[in-house]
Image (cartoon, rainbow, N blue to C red):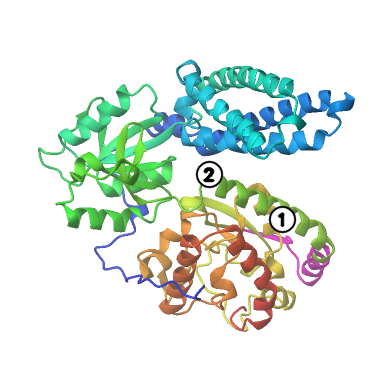
Amino acid sequence: MNGTAEMSLPMPTTETLTASLATPTKMPALSTLTAATARKAFSPSIFVGIARVVELSLLLALGSFIAAAYAIAPDHSNSQQYTIAAILTVLTAAAAFQVLDLYRVTVFSHPLTNFARLAFGWTIAMGGLVLSLFFIKAGADFSRVWLLLWFILGLVTIAVFRGVLSAATAAARSHGLFMQNAVIYGTGPIVAELVKTVINDPNSDIRICGVFDDRTDSRSDTVITNVEHLGNVDALIALSRQVRLDLVIMALPLSAESRVSTLMRRLWVLPVDVRLAASASGLQFRPRNYSYVGAMPMLDLSDKPIRDWGGVAKWLFDKVIATLALIALAPVMVGVALAVRWESRGPVIFRQKRYGFNNELIEVYKFRSMYTDMADATAAKLVTKDDPRVTRVGRIIRKTSLDELPQLVNVLMGTLSLVGPRPHAVHAKAADKLYPDVVESYFARHKVKPGITGWAQINGWRGETNTPEKILKRVEHDIFYIENWSVWFDLLILLKTPSSLLKSENAY
C-alpha cells in the first residue's frame, strides 16, 4: 500500500460551499421524517447469513445425531465416517441452495412456493452422497436406514425451519427492520415510474423519503405519487445529515453526463449507496451486470465503505481490542490522571465536541493537557511548539499520545473506532481557514467513524496543521484508508502506531 492516495482534492472556489452547511429549499416536518427513519436498518445480508448457518447446522446436527444413535449397534460402531459424510453432504446442500437462489429474504417470505426447490436441493445433496459411496465402493459401510432417515427428517427439518423463518421475516418486515430510506434525484415520468414501482412492490423494503432536483422550472414536479419534491442537491445533502439515508437513486439519462458527474462529486462524501436507474440511463446490460432495488435494475455508482459483515467484523474488532486495552493500560491511565491532577487544578478529563460519523457532533474524551483557564474547547487556535497553554505533563502526554487513552471509552460507547480518520474539532483551522474551506472533499472522511489512530497518523501526518498542504495530506490518507479498508488494514495500522509515535516530530 502506498502512503498517499492517488487522487486530487481540489481547492474550493467561493461558489463551492460545503454541502452539509447548505440550507434546504424545502423540507418536510423533520419530526415526522426523523421518527420514520430513526431505526437503523438490519442488513438483509447478515439476516440471510445467520439463517444459512442455522439451517445448515440443524441439518448437520440431525445427521450426526442419527449416526450417533446407530453407533450403539456393533455393526455400526464407526460414527466418525458418518460425521465426515454428514459434513460433506451439508456443504453440498449449501452449494445447491445457493445455486438455486434459495438464500434471499424474498424467498424466506414464501416457503410453500419455494419448497419444491428446497426439496430438489436437498435431494441433490443426498443423491451426491449416495453416488459417492457407490463409486468409492463404501456403500456397505453405511446404514441404508441412516441415509433414508436423514433424507426424510432433513426434508421435515427444512420445512419446519423455513416456516419459522417465514414468520420471523414477516415480523422483521412489519417492524421495518429491513427498511432502507431512499431518495430519488431527478424528475419527470421516469421518477414517477420508479416511485410507483417501489410502492406497488409487495416485497419492497424501500421507503422513498422524497424527490430532489436542481431544476426549478415546470419540469420539476411538486408532488409525484404522494412523494414530495424537497428541493435541490444541497437540500438532499442537508437532509442526509439530519436523518438516516441509505440510498440515493439517480434517475437521469446518460446524455446528461455533466449533471451525473457534477452530482457524483457532491454525493460521494455521503455514507450512502448511490445508484443510477438503468431504465433512466437507457442502457441494456445482461441481468448479472445490474444490482436491484426491489424489481428495479440499477447501475452501482458508489457504495457505503463499510457494510454488512464488514461492519460486524469492525465492531467486534473495536470492542474486543478496546476492552483488553483498557484493562492492560489501566495502571498507566491512573498514573497519567494523578500527574495531571497534581500539576494543575481542574478536571482530569477534557471533553471536546468534534465531527463524528456523517458530520454528527460527538463528545471526545482526552486527558487534560492545558491549564484549565487557557483550555480551548473549540480548537479555534492551533497548539504550537512551546505553547504556553500546555502544562509540563501535557507536553509529555501529547507527545506520546497518552492524552488520547480515554478515547478507548469512546470506542466502547460507539462514537469512535480504534482505527479511522482522526476526529477534528468543528472550528479547527489550517492557515486561518476552516478545514472544509481548504479541502473541498473534506467531509468525505466522515463516511466512516473517526478513530483513535489512522493511516494518516502512522505516515507522519499528525500534530499541527499550519499549512493547507498538511490538512490536504491528512485527508488524502484518510480517503485512501476508507477506500481500501479491511480488518487486516486496521490491524496493520494498530500495530504500527506505537513505533510511529516514537518517530513523530509534529505533536506538541
**Residue occupying image coordinates x 61% and y 29%:** 126
Query: Circle 1 — which element?
Result: helix
Nearer-the-camera pick, 417 or 51:
51
Horizontal side of 367 relative to 463 (left or right) equals right
- Residue 1 coordinates in the image, percent (x, y): 52, 72
- Residue 299 coordinates in the image, percent (x, y): 30, 46
- Residue 193 coordinates in the image, percent (x, y): 21, 30
10 Å neighbourhood of mark 1: few (<14), some, or many (≥20)?
Answer: many
Does the stretch in magenta take in 273?
A: no
Q: Write down the residue under mark 1.
A: 322
Given this view, does label 2 or label 1 mark the residue nearer the observer?
A: 2
Horizontal side of 361 relative to 290 (left or right) equals right
Marks 2 and 1 sit apart, C-alpha to C-alpha, by 21 Å
- Residue 411 coordinates in the image, percent (x, y): 65, 53
Q: Write down the residue under mark 2.
A: 308
Q: Say if 455 sits above or below 302 in the image.
A: below
Q: Amino acid at mark 1?
A: Ala
